[in-house]
Image: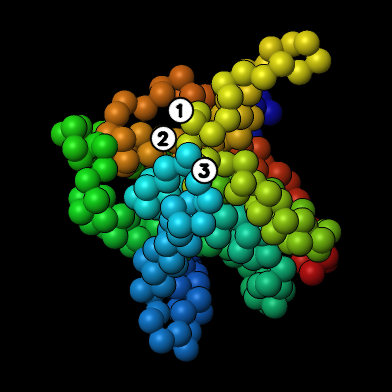
Amino acid sequence: MSALNGYRGLFGQLGELLNHRYLISNLVSRNLKVRYKNSLLGIAWSMLNPLLMMLVFTVVFTVLQGGMDVEVPPAFILAGLLPWNFFAGTVTIATGSIVDNSSIIKKVYFPRESLPISVMLSNLVHFVIALPIYFILATVMGIPGAENGSFFPHLLWLPLIIIVEAMFTLGLSFITATINVFYRDMQIVMETLIMAWFFVTPVFYDFEKTFAATKIIFGIEVPISRLAFILNPMASITSAYRDAMYYGRPLALDFFLRTAITAIVMLVIGYWFFRRNNWRFGEEL
């Protein structure tokens, strides 16, 4: 009976979100307008920001590398930067989304989860807007997938990869946004953690070419490369994007399936944690 009530409660919550879909749409629109208010280039920064970052990393690894045998093509970097910016931008902003909207929360009732969801959707808009720039550059530069003719069929995986990343990102955002209401240090912690997370995720380097597959630790052979992808879902997600968008090859389905399950679990736990504590938001803000 309790399980049945739980299902009814879950569907009731999802139904409430659906009834407030226009509110979420307005919040997404507001986020986009606020982000580029008084900006000369406006939403064009969605495309220019990853391009500028790509140029920085390209210069570092081609001009300033000092003879290191590292080849990092610009399109390779961009294929990793775009999904990373979607993830990092969402989690960073969503962590403070409840606290930053405390005045609204105190005045009117609405599903509080609308705030992190709207942040994720607005950053998804930026991501989708920037994708055409990547495909133009990829076509011009002649990436491996375009050269061997296998580029376009594997793009059919792209919507599924985006959904998996969105679920993982939103689940984590629910958790960090909730914790930030009770412990405001969470915003600073996440900014630092995201920076460290960036360097352990193969955004601007090929993990398999940069690090050894195995390493002897305390006399035990440890599969470093495999563990890095198991313990870091963003590593697997980034590699999946590159398989589809850069190399034009089949996904590593074992890792991707594991990551998809991890994303679903993260979303369920994050949403449960958020709903369990959101009734206390008003008194804490």
CB atoms of marks 2 and 1 within 8 Å: yes
Mark sitting on residue 240? 2
> Residue at 62% across / 46% down in the picture?
199
| x then y, percent, for residue 111 | 59, 59
**Which residue has dot 1 on it?**
256
Q: Quadrant of residue 93?
A: bottom right
Q: Distance between the Cα atoms at labels 3 and 2? A: 27 Å
Q: Identify which residue is drawn at 58% across, 24% down.
A: 212
CA neighbours of label 1 inside 10 A, class few (<14), some (14 to 19), many (20+): many
Q: CA distance from mark 3 to mark 1?
A: 32 Å
User: Who comes first in sequence, dot 3 or dot 2?
Assistant: 3
Total tally of numbered discs in the picture: 3
Q: Nearer the viewer, mark 3 or mark 1?
A: 3
Q: Which residue is mark 3?
A: 68
Task: Name the amino acid, label 3.
Answer: Met
Up/down of 278 relative to 258, above or below:
below
One can see residue 128 in this view:
yes
Indicate the secondary structure of the residue bearing disc 2.
helix
Left or right position of 191 against 41:
right
Query: In the rendered structure, which amino acid carries the disc numbered 2?
Result: Ala
**Residue 74 relative to residue 64: left or right:** left
Q: Give the residue drawn at x 40%, y 80%.
A: 42
Mark 1 residue type: Phe
| Residue 142 sits above or below residue 219 on the image | below
Viewport quadrant of the N terminus: top right
Report helix, strand or loop for mark 1. helix
In the rendered view, tell whether residue 107 sits above or below residue 65. Answer: below
CB contact under 8 Å: marks 3 and 1:
no
Q: Position of residue 278 (x, y in %)?
A: 72, 55
Percent from the top left, x then y, of residue 285? 79, 69
**Can residue 153 be seen?**
no
Give 187 or 14, whichever is nearer the viewer: 187
